[in-house]
Every structure is written in structure tokens, then in C-alpha cells.
Amino acid sequence: MELLKVKPKYQQILMDMEDGLTEETEIFYALDLVKDEFEVKADNVACVIKNLDAEETLIIKEMEKLFERANEKRHQSIIFKKYLKHRMINNNIVKVETPRNYIRLKKTSEFIIEQKKFIDWAQDNAEHLINYVKPYANKIAIKKAIRAGENVLYAKFQGKKKVVIE
């Protein structure tokens, strides 16, 4: 990916941020120290923002690919474990010892709960075993309702400004 070119002084501030300059006030101060016309400064800062946004997008895509690879490896591992387990069971082998591995079949139990039947029973017999979820505001539904003209108390859109870089 080709990043947008910025003046060295802005690049230096970005490098300082990567080296630990994290306080917003310090960053603002460093940017204020740069002696440029505001248009030039705004243009360079906008280019830095675009570069950071582009890098973030690339990193997220890399993370998604790594996550997919990790899932594939986990799935492959599960297949090999199933194979080994079935072969050990079929051959009545409980353990295998080699110089590199100690492999054994371990008895475990799976926890199974029939949600609906359990809830019906627990409401009358063991209320302490049930968790109730606190109600919360459904922001998506509220926004739709307000946009549709409904009168919704205690919720509103509040105007504010944000920087748009195109």
C-alpha cells in the first residue's frame, strides 16, 4: 500500500507516538509547535490520519486471516485427536508412553442442560439457580423510532461536529 507523503516534522510526531508519546495534550502541543500555515498543517494532519486509518484496516485484515488460520489449525487438531481417541478405544488401549509423549484416555463428563425444562422446574423449586438479565435500552430500535417520528422520552439525537477527510 502506498501511504500519503507528509512533512518530516509530522512524521516525527507520529514516530514519537509509537515510541510512547500517548497523552493527548502532549500530542496537541507537539502539533501546535509545528510552524506551518493552518492549511498546510491541516493537509499534513489529514494525510497522517488517512495513513493511520489505512494501516488499521490492513492490520484488521491480517488479524482476520490469522484468526481463520488459527481456526483451521484448531479444527485439524480436533480431527487428529478424534482419530487417536477412536483408535485407542477400538484397540482397548488406555495409555501410550513414548520418549516424546504420554497419551492416555481420560474419563470426563459432559454437562448437558435442557434449558426450557430446567427453567420451568427451577422457577418453582430452585430460583437461585436462574440468572435474570437486567433490561437495557435497545439503541437501534430507539434510533429507528425517533427517526420514524415517534415521541420517545429520555432519548434524543444530539448535534455534534466531527472531522470528515475525503
Image: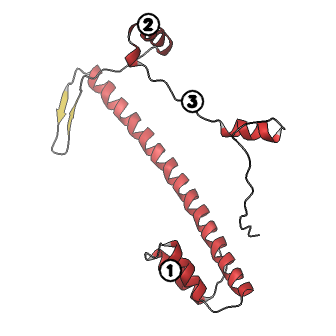
Residue 90, x across and y down, in percent: 29, 20
User: Seen from this angle, which residue lies furthest front?
Assistant: 153
Q: CA distance from mark 1 to mark 3?
A: 45 Å
Q: Quadrant of the C terminus?
A: bottom right
Residue 9, x across and y down, in percent: 57, 88
Q: Residue at x 48, y 24 (%)?
A: 132
Residue 148, x across and y down, in percent: 83, 38
Q: CA distance from mark 1 to mark 2?
A: 63 Å
Q: Name the amino acid, label 1.
A: Met
| Residue 80 versus residue 32 in the image, above or below | above
Q: Which element is circle 1 on?
A: helix
Q: Which element is circle 2 on?
A: helix
The mark that comes first in sequence, 1 or 3, is: 1
**Which numbered tag is attached to residue 83?**
none
| Residue 8 versus residue 45 in the image, above or below | below
Q: Name the amino acid, label 2.
A: Asp
Task: Describe residue 97's horizontal placement relative to residue 147 as left or right.
Answer: left
Q: Residues within 10 Å of mark 2 (few under 14, many from 20)?
A: few
- Asked whether 93 or 48 is in front, the reply is 48
Q: Residue at x 74, y 41 (%)?
A: 143
Q: Which residue is mark 2?
A: 124
* Residue 116 can be seen, yes or no: yes
The mark that comes first in sequence, 3 or 2, is: 2
The quarter of the displayed image where residue 109 is located = top left
Task: Describe residue 53's horizontal placement relative to residue 109 as left or right.
Answer: right
Q: Which residue is mark 3?
A: 135
Q: Which residue is mark 1?
A: 15
Task: Describe residue 25's horizontal placement relative to residue 37 as left or right.
Answer: left
